[in-house]
Image (tube, grey):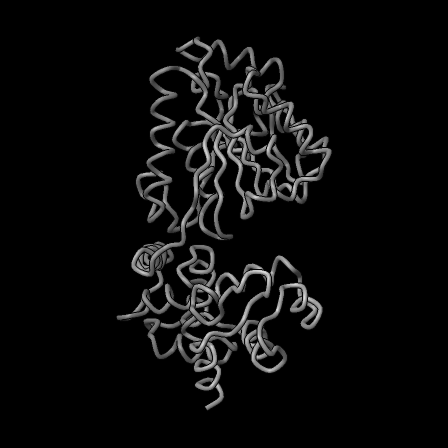
Amino acid sequence: MHGALANLEARALIERRTVGGRLVYRRTDAGQTAAGSALRDESTSLLSSAAVERCFGLFRPEAGAPADLSQLVGQDGGRQIIEHNLRWAQRTGHVPASMLLYGASGSGKTLVAGLVSRSLGVPLIHLSMPAVAYDDVQTALDMAEDGSVVCFDELHTAPRRVGDALLIALDPGGDARYVSVAATTDPGALGPSLRRRFELEIPFTDYSVTEAEELARRRAAALGLPVGPGVPYLIARASRANPARISRLLKEGAMLVEGTQNVLSCEQLSEYLALTNRDERGVDAIELEMLVFLRDQCEAAAGLTKLVDALGLDLKFIREHMHMLRQEGLVQDRGKQGHALTPSGRAYLADRAS
């Protein structure tokens, strides 16, 4: 791949640019001309506007991750909406409708943006909104006019100036020739005007343990990690059915058996979780501290800001982990009063202490 890029750059068909701290390539005017003459279909559709040498920009999923939308585990409703959108675009020759994907961190939103680009056969331009500057966004959108999928990751964190620029760039009345896919964990934090720029809103729901178990099984096989009976379920459970955490725990499991002929067993993994202050429900040392604080320092309930002040943790971190503790049934949300331990939470702490 690097040889092909060097050849294209030497021929002045592509040039290097930096977007959000990442090195990317874009076609020059000469490259545009060369691409146009090489394409069989000379229509102005998105698919026919891709570069002649497209390999450098195509999304490549990590080992064990789905290679296309049909292989996606879970998110059946969201996948249906996306697939209908892509088929509609193919039938009509229009650019696919812009999409806002929202759901928990690590649920696969960015992965799906990459799979959309693979389905269309065009490059993916990924922008992590907390890290990009105004000029980065302008450069990326200029590059994207060649035919790309642009992923605005963590859109709710975009600085105001960047958000204002997106309002103009993503105007539905415009003639942009790229696909806009935004990902956010907090759609409510988006301004109404920016939110309306996305024609489709697609929720990413929590995975079931059964779906997560299948995901763990597939990714273990792709990593060449031999696992014993029950290990995919344990990984799914300890990861709280979150794809990103499943991937991390599988890598940790691979480290446990590296250089040996051993199969990763439930006993081995359980011992490792205990040594690293985690349990089979995914509760770690920080979450345990949060639970103990609610039990010992709060007569009824505590707001998130009180937890932030007491534990010195980031509000976003507290909110995310409270969500997971609610899923486990260990805490409950009492509205304006805040969060409180459930009877199950008290029983859990008693069991941990015994």
Left or right: residue 154 compared with residue 47: right
Question: Residue 207, percent across and down?
Answer: 37, 54
Residue 318: x and y, percent? 60, 63
Q: Residue at x 37, y 51 (%)?
A: 64
Q: Position of residue 215 (x, y in %)?
A: 34, 55
Query: Where is 287 relative to 102, above or below?
Result: below
Quadrant of res 174: top right
The single residue placed furthest to the left in the displayed view is 229
Given residues 239 and 171, the one toward you in this image is 171
Residue 304: x %, y % from top left: 63, 64
Examine the rendered structure and indicate whether residue 7 appears above or below residue 303.
Answer: above
In this orientation, which residue lies closer to the viewer: 309 or 183? 309
What is the quadrant of the C terminus in the image?
A: bottom left
**Residue 74 in the figure: left or right of residue 33:** left
Seen in the image, is 228 located left or right of residue 183?
left
Q: How many marks?
A: 0
> Quarter-wise, where is residue 125 in the image?
top right
* Between 171 and 127, the one nearer to me in the picture: 171
